[in-house]
Image: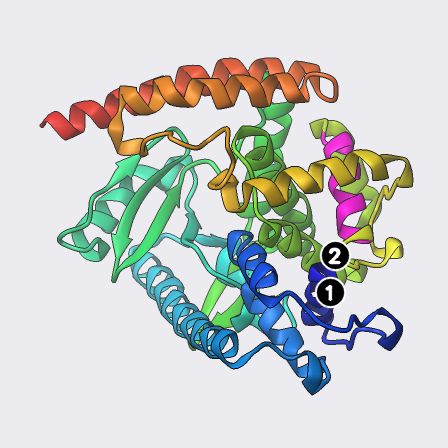
Amino acid sequence: MFFELLRSGLYGIPIPSDRLPRHIKWKKIVDTARKNAVLGIIIESLQFLPSSLLPPSDIAVGMKRYALSLIRSNMTMDRAAAKLTERFREHGIEGVVMKGQGVARYYRIPQIRQSGDIDFYVGKDLYRNAIRIAEEYLADKSSHDDENEQHYMFWMDGVPVELHRLASKIYTPRRNRRFQKWIISRLENPEARRSIVIDNVEVSVPSYDFDAVYIFYHAWRHYIVSGIGLRQLCDWAMVLHSHYDDIDIDRLISNLHSFGMTKGWKLFGCIAVEYLGLPAAKMPLYDPSYSRKAAKTLASILEGGSFGHYSRLNAGVPGRDQGLRYALRKIRPVIVSSFNMLKEIPVEAFFMLLDRIYHGSIDCIRRANRKKR
């Protein structure tokens, strides 16, 4: 029933009458939706249900409050994305808003998507200058900044912002070199980007073909390392559902092969088609032979919740600000994740393990030293 409601909210369609139950366990539905950051989508499905199946008043009131908080949050994030764009543009930097508020526009109703932070890509060449601008003009005075190999994080008007020098990375060096060239060609070339209007400001966002690959890989990478919620897979499904005809599918498939992503794509593709309701015709490389693995993967995603926060493997791991304590406690989940993926992507799993231990330790030592100062 949870997935019936999720599909109904995503696509704005009633659940077929022959699949409607006599009653709905709303508390369990809401708990699962919260853990996977898709409660807004479930709330959107209520308008298509008969009155006899609507949630009881106490749960309904909580859902209405949550819906209002989602709308307010998205308005705040829209203002922040527009402000970032304008301020950096004033200083000659045309950044690109990745995921987030741009991806929300792929949804039928953008406000139902739960927002997190703002990922703002500036690239390697402009990165240090962008940090200077952020610290001087944008960061909250009480903001605690943070930096790792991919981005600099700061708070602006109470909104977390990640200023990216790298959009992402593949752990296998040879494939990563191809991946980085592709990212630069799509994000740093004005002709390869799109623009949308957010809060009355023209904001640069990636092309549809970039988002189809990048949003998938962002979800895949987080799934391997710690976990994801269903919202990340909904984001990916909405890209393909909304703009399949605008994507060069042959080029997309060629990129997936070049980056070594086809197995993960097929695995998540089964979830998108068989559980999230994306038409099979809109899922490149859809392969039903992955259905059994997809069911196990989905169970793991539901158990761990958004970014694996509810996973037993991650339980008890201290916050990232705990420096070496975090690194030492996080090593076990990283090792387990790597071994879980050895059968599917052995080379990538090996390099991921080395990378996560090395860079994770460096990040935690840096945090510990900053904390002492």
The N terminus: image quadrant: bottom right
- Tags 1 and 2 touching, CB below 8 Å: yes
Q: How many discs appear?
A: 2
In the displayed structure, would residue 266 be above or below residue 120?
A: above
Q: In the image, what residue occupies the spot 33% across and 52% down?
A: 160
Kindly tell me whether residue 185 is visible in this rendering. Answer: no
Does 21 sit left or right of 364 as displayed?
right
Q: In the image, what residue occupies the spot 81% across and 61% down?
A: 245
> Magenta: predominant secondary structure element?
helix
- Distance from Cα at disc 1 to Cα at disc 2: 6 Å
- Please check the rendered image and state whether residue 288 is part of the magenta-colored stretch, yes or no: no
Q: Residues within 10 Å of mark 1 (few under 14, many from 20)?
A: many
Q: Residues within 10 Å of mark 2 (few under 14, many from 20)?
A: many
In the drawing, what numbered circle is on residue 7?
A: 1
The residue type indicated by label 2 comes to: Leu
- Please check the rendered image and state whether residue 269 is part of the magenta-colored stretch, yes or no: yes
**SS label for mark 2:** loop
Instruction: Residue 268 in the image: state x and y as whole percent.
Output: 73, 42
Kindly tell me whether residue 114 is visible in this rendering. Answer: yes
What range of the chain is rendered magenta?
261-273
Which quadrant of the view contains residue 294?
top right
Q: Earlier in the sequence, mark 1 or mark 2?
A: 1
The residue type indicated by label 1 comes to: Arg
Q: Residue furthest left?
A: 373
Q: Which residue is mark 2?
A: 276
In the displayed structure, would residue 67 be above or below residue 25?
A: below
Q: In front: 201, or 139?
A: 139
Q: In the image, what residue occupies the spot 58% across and 23% down?
A: 337
Q: In the image, what residue occupies the spot 58% across and 55% down?
A: 32
Instruction: Residue 235 in the image: state x and y as whole percent.
Output: 62, 55
Q: In front: 362, or 84?
A: 362
